[in-house]
Every structure is written in structure tokens, then in C-alpha cells.
Image: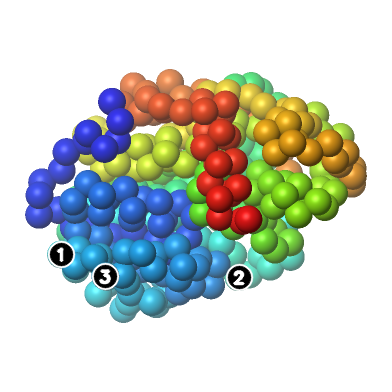
Amino acid sequence: MSFRELKFDSDSVFLVTGGAGFIGSNICEALLEMGYTVRCLDDLSTGHYSNIEPFISDPKFTFLKEDIRDLDACMKATEGVRYVCHEAAWGSVPRSIEMPLLYEEINIRGTINMMEAARQNKVERFVYASSSSVYGDSTVLPKKEGGEGKLLSPYALTKRTDEEYGRLYHSLYGLNTYGLRYFNVFGRRQDPDGAYAAVIPKFIKLLLNGEQPVIYGDGRQSRDFTYVDNVIEANLRACLAPESAAGEAYNIGAAGREYLIDVYYTLCRALGKDTEPVFGEPRKGDIRDSNADITKARTLLGYDPSYDFAAGIELAIDWYRENLS
């Protein structure tokens, strides 16, 4: 079943933090298309107004330019809200190594602010973004909840800390929290620019511009690349999940495993390019291999990803070809 067939009460109000970002804007768009009322909170530090500009005139959409580090702003944003999809965070493992204090402020303190505001305003479901980076140096594949290793970056630490607060806010205060460990999400509106851009949009843009991409490492590192519509589904299913499933974290992937060098040549073939990559030194904090066991999310959330890598990458390439040309 497509996430578009999921049903909420017609008067449901959703708050999407980080709603002007890649994943957040896609969640906002899906909810609006389904006919629900959506508030978007974003300080535009990493999100883009252009991502939500098409929704601004929709009477069911409200944009709040606020910072999750401001508890008062979080309190106001959650008034009358039934469901929170908390996507606001700073991403990128390499950047977190350079700016650990800022990551602590935004990803940990900002998330606690949101949980506290949700608790006080009696939000029914608090769904928040975690990350596959919490598996750290564990070499076990596929990655399964409970099999985490030593963390490799400040970013990973912030997400693991968020999960612990999610557990505590459920057990101590009764807030129904659901952590979603995203595995390498990609798709429309993912930013291809900047030193910390995700690999798929960055490769696509460079290839379209006739430039030579850099692969850090030997290219044999593997990822469970997950199309963004699967992540939308996971968020909405978590909003409908039973209380018995709360206080937990769940792997959200496509249950696939793609080697980076294979992904690169897939993009080359699709774009009609024969550009060879440059290989650089491996990056600090990067996990070597990542592949999700999604049994827990299937069983407790009803998560059933509709898109495998092949289907998702075709849609993503079409979007970038149209929007970057």
C-alpha cells in the first residue's frame, strides 16, 4: 500500500521540523497532497526556501522561520499539533568532526527542546530522524537494532543520544516517540552543492557538468541507498503506529546493498557519460559497509518500502536531469 492511501483524522495537524530541507520538504509535500494541515519549522541554515515556495500559498501550509534551539519557538510551534515529524538537524559526518559543539547544540539540545515542547503540548506521536551512523564500527551485516558498535563521529553520537532521550521521554513522561534510523536517503530536492553534499546528487551534478567526481576510498564501500518516498512512508506509518511500538528506534532502508563504484557507473550509463572518477583518501568517521535489516520496522510499524534502489535512482536521475539542466 502506498503511503498516500494511509488515513488520518481530517482535522489532523502535522508539524515538520526541518521542513525546508530535503526530507522535510518531501514530507510536507506528501501531507499537503493528502489534504492535511502542515506547519513547517525551519531556520533555513541548511534548508532552502525554494523547497517550500510552491506550498506557501496553500491555506493548509504555514511556514515558521524559527530555530529548534529556541524552546519558546518549539512550544509555540507544537500548540494544537497531533503529529511531529522531527527532521531538523545538521547532517554530514565530516562536518560534525569539524564542528562538534554546534552539532551538540542543534542535534541534541534542539531535539530535547522539541521533545519537551511535544510533551507539554500533549502531542500524540513524536517521530524523529536518527541515522544508520549509530552502528559505528560494527562489521556485522545486515545492521540490526541492538547490534551497534563504537561510534565514529560526533554526528553519530548526537543521533544515538537522541535515541536515548526518545526512550526516556517515552518511559518517564509517556511521550510516544519513534526513532527512524535512515540509511543513505536520496531523491528529489537533495542538495548537490557544497563540500558536504550527499554522494548521489553530487555525482549527478558533476557528471552533468562534465566534471570528474572524487570517490573517497576504493569505491568498494557499500550502502543501503534508500529512496525518499520510502522515508515518507516510514514517517507516516510511525505516526499511525501503536503505543506499544513507542520508545524504540527502527532501521529505515531498502534492505539492499550497493557498492559505491557500481552506483557511480550506473549514473554514468544513465547520463551517457564515460568519465572515470578520481580516488581520494577515505574520510574519517565513515562507516565501511551499511545494509539494513528492516524486520523490526516491518513487524512493528508496518513499514514496507515500495522502491528498491533501481526504481528510486531512475526517478532521481530524471528529477536532476530536469532541474539541474
Judge whether residue 7 can be spotted in this image: yes
Q: Which residue is rendered at x = 33% and y = 74% of the image?
A: 64
Q: Amino acid at mark 3?
A: Ser
In the image, taking residue 257 as reference, residue 45 lies left or right, namely: left
- Residues 295 and 18: in front is 18
Q: How dense is the environment of label 3, judged by Cα within 10 Å: few (below 14), some, or many (20 and up)? A: few
Q: Which residue is mark 3?
A: 57
- Residue corresponding to mark 2: 102
Marks 1/3: CA distance? 21 Å
Q: Residue at x 31, y 78 (%)?
A: 72
x and y percentages locating residue 84 in the rendered image: 29, 55
> Secondary structure under badge 1?
loop
Q: CA distance from mark 3 to mark 2?
A: 33 Å
What's the residue type where badge 1 is placed? Answer: Gly
Q: How far across and down, in percent of the image, does residue 65 sit?
A: 38, 77
Identify the image quadrant of the N terminus: top left
Q: Earlier in the sequence, mark 1 or mark 3?
A: 3
Q: Using a 10 Å C-alpha cutoff, classify the residue at mark 1 as few (fewer than 14 neighbours), some (14 to 19) or many (20 or more).
A: some
